[in-house]
Image (cartoon, rainbow, N blue to C red):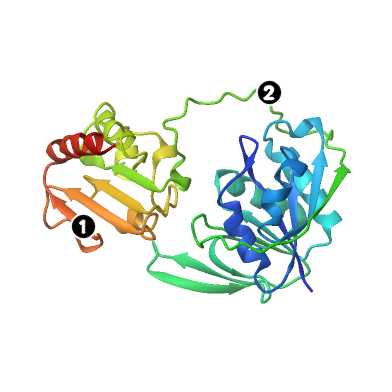
């Protein structure tokens, strides 16, 4: 039986929801799954990991892991990976995963496939989207150890009960480094709901006109518990920060409802939200490409339509 290690990314002391998607790919095919925990409490998250097929958990104990430091985390993950004896490592292609996995691959001199939408651990192969989602490629890796990054929101999590053991290991993480983490400054959250975990998302495009006008989107979104996103055009215009960007070069989302406000529907944006269950488009241009990709369309000026929607949502909430 093959053994698969999964990097358990945490968020505010809890396992990130998309990690359960990674675990789904890991336990399919009957692989023995080992969770690697570098932050938080392994015992505290043991129950949730057992629900998704994790049969062993390795936690690296060190004060150096109190805050995410790429060099330190890479060394800790490698130590845990070697200790596990796994032949594959899977991790979420999140902002942290995009930073951490290439460092691990470089240190171990191993090939790495990022942003996979399907992972077949038994065959060491993945499906990866190319050309803004217009084509898919199946790629295989060979060797004693394979590294895979899984694109968020690629699969619905599937539970598989297991009984997990927890093992703590001590690793020397005090070696000299070119980069030393001095301080962590956390930005104020833009909303209560994280984009990649949101069930409803309202996004604004370049038509929003200014950063101040995004308050109209936030006001409407709060009545339905939605997260707020933005197109690359809006971000490039300075109307929204990059962490709000949805699309090929931003975040990949898969909400139940995606409401595109003043977004034309370029393939790069569509690549990041095409798996949304229901897509609603609001655009004053009846020929906008987004209307060929949406389930419901409203032809109208967003500055007229969105405030009216906000009134309706407020009455219903």
Please give the name of the residue rendered at 15% of the width and 51% of the height, measured from the top-left corner: 298
The quadrant of the rendering that contains the N terminus is bottom right
Which sits in the foreground, 61 or 42? 42
As measured in the structure, the alpha-carbon distance from the residue carrying label 1 to the one carrying label 2 is: 49 Å
Is residue 13 rendered to the left or right of residue 173? left
Q: Which residue is mark 1?
A: 296
Q: Label 1's element? A: strand
Q: Label 2's element? A: loop
Quarter holding residue 181: top right
Sequence-wise first label, 1 or 2: 2
Residue 221 location in percent, x, y?
31, 37
Q: Please, is residue 106 above or below residue 156 in the view? A: above
Residue 141 location in percent, x, y?
66, 71
**Residue furthest out toward the bottom:** 123
The quadrant of the rendering that contains the C terminus is top left
Which sits in the foreground, 144 or 109? 144
Q: Which residue is mark 2?
A: 182
Residue 186 location in percent, x, y?
55, 26
């Amino acid at each position: 039986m093959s053994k698969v290690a999964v990097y358990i990314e945490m968020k505010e002391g809890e396992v990130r929801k998309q990690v359960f998607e990674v675990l789904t790919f890991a336990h399919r095919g009957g692989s023995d799954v080992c969770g690697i925990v570098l932050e938080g409490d392994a015992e505290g998250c043991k129950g949730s990991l057992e629900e998704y097929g994790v049969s062993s958990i390795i936690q690296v104990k060190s004060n150096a892991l109190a805050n995410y430091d790429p060099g330190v985390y890479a060394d800790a993950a490698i130590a845990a990976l070697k200790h596990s004896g796994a032949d594959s490592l899977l991790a979420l292609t999140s902002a942290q995963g995009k930073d951490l996995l290439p460092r691990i691959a470089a240190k171990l001199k191993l090939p790495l496939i990022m942003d996979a939408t399907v992972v077949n651990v038994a065959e060491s192969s993945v499906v990866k989207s190319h050309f803004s989602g217009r084509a898919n490629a199946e790629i295989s890796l060979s060797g004693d150890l394979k590294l895979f990054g899984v694109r968020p929101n690629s699969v619905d999590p599937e539970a598989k009960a297991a009984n997990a053991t927890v093992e703590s290991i001590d690793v020397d993480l005090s070696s000299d480094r070119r980069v030393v983490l001095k301080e962590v400054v956390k930005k104020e959250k833009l909303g209560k709901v994280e984009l990649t975990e949101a069930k409803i998302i309202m996004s604004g495009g370049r038509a929003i006109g200014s950063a101040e006008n995004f308050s109209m989107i936030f006001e409407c979104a709060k009545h339905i518990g939605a997260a707020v996103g933005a197109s690359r055009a809006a971000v490039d215009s300075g109307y929204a920060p990059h962490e709000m960007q949805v699309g090929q070069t931003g975040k990949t989302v898969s909400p139940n409802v995606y409401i595109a406000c003043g977004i034309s529907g370029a393939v790069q944006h569509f690549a990041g939200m095409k798996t949304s269950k229901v897509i609603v488009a609001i655009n004053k241009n009846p020929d906008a490409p987004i209307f060929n990709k949406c389930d419901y369309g409203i032809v109208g000026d967003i500055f007229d339509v969105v405030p009216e929607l906000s009134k309706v949502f407020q009455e219903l909430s």
